[in-house]
């Protein structure tokens, strides 16, 4: 037997229905966000400027390679910029690591202005790098909400 007057019971039922409806809306909106994230692509661009071989091996190349092979990002790109272009052209160990990364799907590109200034453009191209102007592409990556940009 109900102890609440009929008016109070009706009010409780109304409040319960409203609460359930609001919860349903929240659940639906969370589901739609899950659908959006399932279709988005997370991308990483690493701007590698350091000419230090230890930075190359112990940070830049190690992280970029793991980010791709570990599927931490859908796309991983390394931009060789500044002194790193000279290091890459001269260091066989760095070259071997870059080659393995490329085989595993890491995109490796180089700034042509930097490569030309160090006289290593042909060497970088022979390693399979796309060597081109990178100012505009980098600016686009920085503005892209699905792109994460790191600089070393």
Image (cartoon, rainbow, N blue to C red):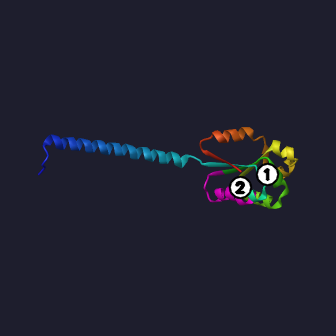
Q: Is residue 104 visible?
A: no
Query: Who is closer to the viewer here, 28 or 58?
Result: 58
**Image spot of residue 75 (x, y percent):** 65, 50
- Image point (13%, 43%), residue name: 5
Check if residue 58 falls in the magenta segment.
yes
- Image point (17%, 44%), residue name: 9
Check if residue 98 falls in the magenta segment.
no
**Image spot of residue 23 (x, y percent):** 35, 45
Residue under pointer 1: 84
Residue 9 shown left or right of residue 31 in the figure = left
**Pointer 2: residues within 10 angstroms few (<14), some, or many (20+)?**
many
For residue 28, the mark is none
Instruction: Tell me which segment is drawn in magenta.
Output: 56-75
CA separation, marks 1 and 2? 11 Å
Q: Quadrant of residue 87?
A: bottom right
- Image point (86%, 51%), residue name: 123
**Image spot of residue 94 (x, y percent):** 79, 59
47 versus 69 height, above or below: above
Q: Is residue 49 visible?
A: yes
For residue 60, the mark is 2
Taken as a whole, is the magenta stretch helix, strand or loop?
helix
Q: Earlier in the sequence, mark 1 or mark 2?
A: 2
Q: Are marks 1 and 2 in contact (CB under 8 Å)?
A: yes
Label 1 element class: helix
């Amino acid at each position: 037997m109900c102890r609440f007057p009929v008016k109070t019971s009706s009010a409780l039922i109304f409040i319960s229905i409203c609460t359930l409806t609001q919860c349903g809306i929240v659940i639906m909106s969370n589901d739609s966000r899950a659908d959006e994230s399932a279709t988005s692509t997370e991308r990483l661009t690493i701007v590698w400027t350091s000419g230090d071989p230890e930075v190359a091996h112990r940070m830049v190349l190690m992280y970029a390679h793991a980010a791709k092979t570990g599927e931490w990002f859908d796309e991983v790109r390394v931009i060789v910029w500044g002194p790193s272009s000279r290091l890459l052209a001269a260091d066989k160990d760095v070259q071997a690591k870059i080659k393995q990364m490329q085989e595993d799907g890491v995109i490796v590109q180089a700034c042509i202005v930097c490569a030309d200034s160090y006289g290593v453009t042909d060497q970088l191209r022979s390693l399979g790098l796309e060597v081109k102007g990178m100012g505009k592409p980098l600016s686009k990556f920085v503005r892209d909400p699905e792109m994460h940009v790191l600089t070393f």
